[in-house]
Image (spheres, helix red, strand yellow):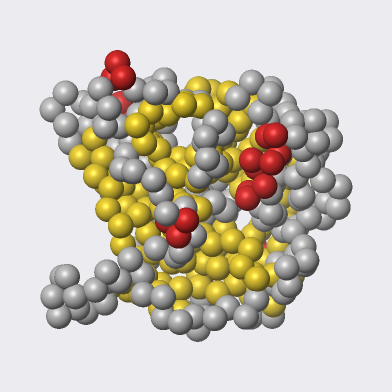
């Protein structure tokens, strides 16, 4: 079995191209130059096989492009509630903030009648700014919102991954919402949402939470929490990693919190690359010279995207808080870029 290649970090350049850096054996970094046409789009993340999610903010167009072959797929820029008759549905524009796939485009499951759908976390730019998950089949003109009713603040969805046949969305309150695709005789997209409540446990982080991520590792779900020292700090100070554990309950209805987060003392040989929608876990023993660590990129613009749309002529994306965290603390291992980008934050490219 071939060892998976580690992701590349894409840093936007002023000319619209990207500087690509990859971690090699020994932990060194090799640099490339990469151009994706047309230039000037904001990168959302990527999917295995060198598929890159992009959005052109001027026209509101979303695109999935393969940087190896140049093949491009259009993605929806609008969604509808799932539970209204088609002729009564109020279609609303959306801006994708995070995207993930159940399988690469071209995979047999992508074209089967009952193939798993695609999922994204979106920001509704026409109504109340809420982050929520919608789903669609490849080639669909619009996505579907399967969550009934309004979303409480603690259930605002900040990350989403595909794991064991379903989409799992991590919320601001550190719970998980699961969107399970269901077979349907006529091929319509049907999804069953359910929630997993996690026991608060009285945790105190003692630092400012910068971000929360969800990643699958060794058939388990991990929550990775990223910190900075103070509210005014602009750089990452560290991480804590938690494993999802199902609690032993006397009866199924004994508690609304049937899950808990169990903190890991060490990374236990893992190499984690953190990025919303595209976090990946690798085994350090498969990459000679690469130590267990958390690699991260500057995604500080994530929660500012709504304001950035309102100020279309004054967009900036910080690009300098990239590096790795290990038992030695935070280290800078990627090329620096103090100058902010006017069109995209950094992104991982999954190969």
Q: How many marks?
A: 0
Which percent across, then down, holds residue 268?
A: 48, 77
Q: Is residue 122 above or below residue 273?
A: above
Give the x, y percent position of residue 260. Answer: 35, 74
The N terminus sits in image quarter: bottom left
Q: Report the front residue among 170 and 337.
A: 170
- Name the side, left or right, on which 96 lies relative to 171: right
Whether residue 236 is situated above or below residue 171 in the rendered picture: below
Which of the 4 image quarters holds residue 55? top right
The residue nearer to you, when weighing 161 against 19, is 161
Residue furthest right in the image? 339
- Measured from the top left, where is residue 338 in percent x and y? 86, 52
Residue 48 located left or right of residue 103 = right
Residue at the image position 60 percent from the left and 72 percent from the top: 239
User: Which of these two is toward me, 50 or 301?
Assistant: 301
Q: Residue at 20%, 40% (x, y): give it.
A: 182
- Rendered location of residue 261, percent (x, y): 40, 74
Question: Residue lying farthest top?
Answer: 87
Relative to 286, residue 2 above or below: above
Q: Is residue 77 above or below residue 190?
A: above
Horizontal side, residue 269 vs residue 118: left or right: right
| Quadrant in the picture for residue 57 | top right
* x 15%, y 70%: residue: 252
Q: Is residue 296 visible?
A: yes
Q: Quadrant of the C terminus?
A: top right
Residue 34 seen in this snapshot: no
Is 49 displayed left or right of 108 in the figure? right
Q: Which residue is located at x 27 percent, y 27 percent?
A: 84
């Amino acid at each position: 079995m071939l060892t998976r290649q580690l992701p590349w970090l894409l840093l936007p350049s002023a000319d619209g191209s990207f500087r690509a850096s990859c971690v090699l054996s020994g932990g060194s970094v090799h640099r490339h130059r990469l151009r994706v046409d047309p230039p000037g789009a904001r990168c959302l993340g990527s999917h295995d096989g060198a598929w890159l999610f992009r959005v052109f903010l001027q026209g509101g167009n979303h695109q999935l492009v393969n940087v190896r072959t140049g093949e491009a797929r259009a993605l929806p820029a609008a969604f509808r509630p799932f539970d209204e008759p088609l002729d009564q549905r109020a279609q609303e524009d959306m801006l994708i903030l995070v995207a993930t796939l159940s399988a690469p485009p071209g995979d047999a499951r992508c074209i089967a009648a009952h193939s798993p759908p695609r999922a994204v976390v979106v920001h509704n730019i026409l109504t109340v700014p809420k982050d929520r998950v919608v789903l669609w089949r490849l080639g669909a003109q619009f996505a579907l919102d399967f969550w009934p009713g309004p979303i409480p603040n603690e259930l605002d969805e900040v990350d989403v991954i595909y794991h064991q046949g379903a989409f799992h969305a991590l919320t601001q309150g550190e719970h998980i919402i699961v969107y399970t695709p269901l077979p349907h005789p006529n091929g319509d997209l049907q999804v069953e949402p359910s929630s997993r409540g996690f026991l608060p446990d009285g945790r105190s982080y003692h630092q400012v939470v910068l971000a929360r991520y969800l990643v699958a590792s060794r058939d388990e779900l991990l929550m990775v929490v990223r910190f900075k020292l103070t509210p005014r700090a602009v750089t990452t100070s560290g991480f804590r990693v938690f494993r999802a554990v199902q609690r032993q309950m006397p009866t199924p209805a004994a508690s609304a919190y049937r899950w808990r987060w169990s903190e890991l003392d060490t990374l236990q040989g893992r190499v984690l690359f953190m990025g919303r929608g595209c976090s990946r876990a690798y085994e350090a023993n498969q990459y000679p010279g690469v130590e267990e660590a958390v690699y991260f990129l500057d995604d500080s613009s994530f929660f500012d995207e709504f304001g950035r749309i309102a100020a279309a002529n004054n967009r900036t994306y910080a690009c300098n808080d990239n590096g790795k965290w290990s038992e030695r603390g935070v280290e800078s291992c990627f090329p620096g870029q103090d100058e902010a980008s006017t069109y995209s934050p950094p992104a991982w490219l999954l190969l």
